[in-house]
Amino acid sequence: MNATDISQALSQRPFKPFRLTLSSGREIPVLNHDAILFNEPRTTLLVVEGERFHVVDLEHIVALTFGGRPTAEQLAS
């Protein structure tokens, strides 16, 4: 996965929520287009999820998946 793929998903209008799947199997929901910030060399990103945040190296993102509804837990966080 590269920064361009993620940027394209973020710039879709209307925005479509998606999930990032990490090499560990963990999934991080991206519920709005303002939820991700890239570092300057675009090798790492920050995903804001409610009051929490995740710092992720792009090399650990194995999939970007559209569809599915966020769980109540994801919406509450």
Image: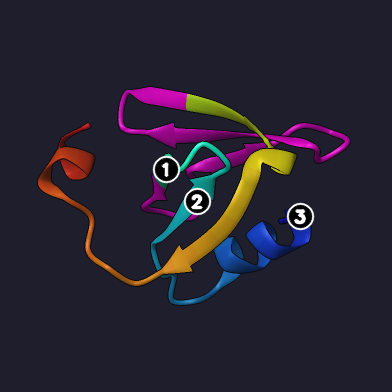
Report the number of numbered marks.
Answer: 3
Q: Which mark is residue 2?
A: 3
In the picture, which quadrant includes the C terminus?
Answer: top left
Which is nearer the eye, 2 or 53? 2
Residue shown at 75% from the left, 53% from the top: 3
Q: Circle 2 sits on which residue?
A: 20
What residue would you read off at disc 1? 28
Q: Residues within 10 Å of mark 3 (few under 14, many from 20)?
A: few
Question: Which residue is at the front of the view, 53 or 33?
Answer: 53
- Expressed as whole percent of the image width and height from the top left, the position of residue 53 reads 45, 25
For disc 1, the neighbor class at 10 Å (few under 14, some 14 to 19, many from 20) is many
Farthest left residue in view: 72
**Precedes in sequence: disc 3 or disc 1:** 3
Residue at screen point 32% across, 23% down: 51
In the rendered image of this protein, does residue 59 appear above or below residue 12? Answer: above
Task: Measure the alpha-carbon separation of dots 2 and 3.
Answer: 12 Å
Determine whether the residue tagged by mark 3 lies in a helix, strand or loop.
loop
Q: Are marks 2 and 3 in contact (CB under 8 Å)?
A: no
Q: Quadrant of residue 15?
A: bottom left
Where residue 31 sits: x, y (%)? 36, 52
In the figure, is residue 34 to the left or right of 16? right
Q: Quadrant of the N terminus?
A: bottom right
CB atoms of marks 2 and 1 within 8 Å? yes
Mark 1: which amino acid?
Answer: Ile
The three-letter code of the residue at mark 3 reads Asn
Residue at figure coordinates x 42%, y 43% from the top left: 28
Residue interval drawn in magenta: 29-53
- Who is closer to the viewer here, 23 or 37? 23
Specify the amino acid type for callout 2.
Leu
Distance Cα–Cα, label 3 vs label 1: 16 Å
Judge the density around disc 2: few (<14), some (14-19), many (≥20) Cα neighbours within 10 Å: many
User: Helix, strand, or loop for circle 2?
Assistant: strand
